[in-house]
Image (tube, rainbow, N blue to C red):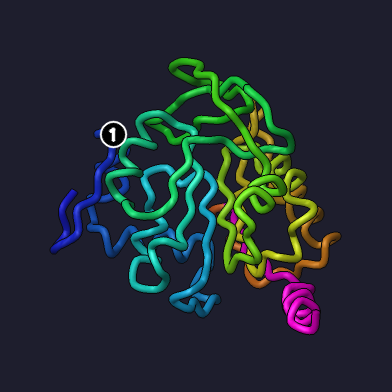
Amino acid sequence: MKDGYIKHYFSNKTRGINLYSSGLSFRANQIADSYKLKNINFKFSDLVIDCGANYGDLWLYLRDKINKKNYITFEPGINEYRALKKNVQSNFNYNLGLGKVESKTNFYINEKDADSSIIEPIIYDRIHEIQTTTLNNFFIKYNIKSIKLLKLEAEGYEPEILLGSNKILNKIEYIAIDGGYERGKDLEETLSKQLNFLLENDFEIIEINLKWGRALLKSKLFNKASLLKKKK
């Protein structure tokens, strides 16, 4: 897809037409609105982690807001990751899944519907073994101090990813979650479970998008943690 001077690659024709037929600017605003990201004032130095980055559509919105080197993506899909690497270069893209433990696990692929998941869905084309890590371990390994935004979209596996982030939640200022009816064969929703977990861990709801089953939350402890760090 070419829109002005921007090229954006995708690997599934049907999905690409559905996503980008109205242009890349439209798609950028669509994804930002779905996660209510316009509540956030980004600085160029802000760090963003995009879990379930797919083709990197979030970057369409962030490209003029943050340094590309501070855009970190996790995308376990094979073809999605190939497109992602073309769409966002000179940053940090990881062909890994996130979870509550580090392990090898099955990944059920349904690229056309963007329903690939570690939780077995109703429909999938094939199974691919992937490596998972945790955000707790990732923060330690790369000595990350804090992030502005964690965008979390894992087709029903979001609660496990949050459990694997429990030690560093106060280092994340905003978390945008996806929790629609898409977990496993029973199509369970995960929005309520994620909201309860984050509220119990000192986050507050900024805005909820019931149409998409998404929400934006902000940490109450983030500024306090930053102040304590400066005092030390």
**In the depicted view, which residue is nearer to us: 70 or 201?**
70
Q: Is residue 220 visible?
A: no
Look at the image and say whether residue 24 sits in the magenta stretch. Answer: no
Tell me residue 70's x, y (percent). Answer: 46, 63
Amino acid type, callout 1: Ser
Q: Residue at x 66, y 43 (%)?
A: 158
Residue topped by disc 1: 11
Q: Look at the picture and state if 183 lies above or below 121.
A: below
At x 73%, y 34%, the residue is 101
Which region of the structure is painted magenta?
Answer: 213-232
Tell which of 182 and 197 is nearer to you.
197
- Tell me where residue 127 appears, x and y as whole percent: 51, 16
Which residue: 74% across, 57% down?
Answer: 168
Using the image, determine if residue 195 lies above or below residue 109. below
136 left or right of 117 in image: right
Q: Note whether 18 is above or below 14 in the view shown.
A: below
Where the C terminus falls, by quadrant? bottom right
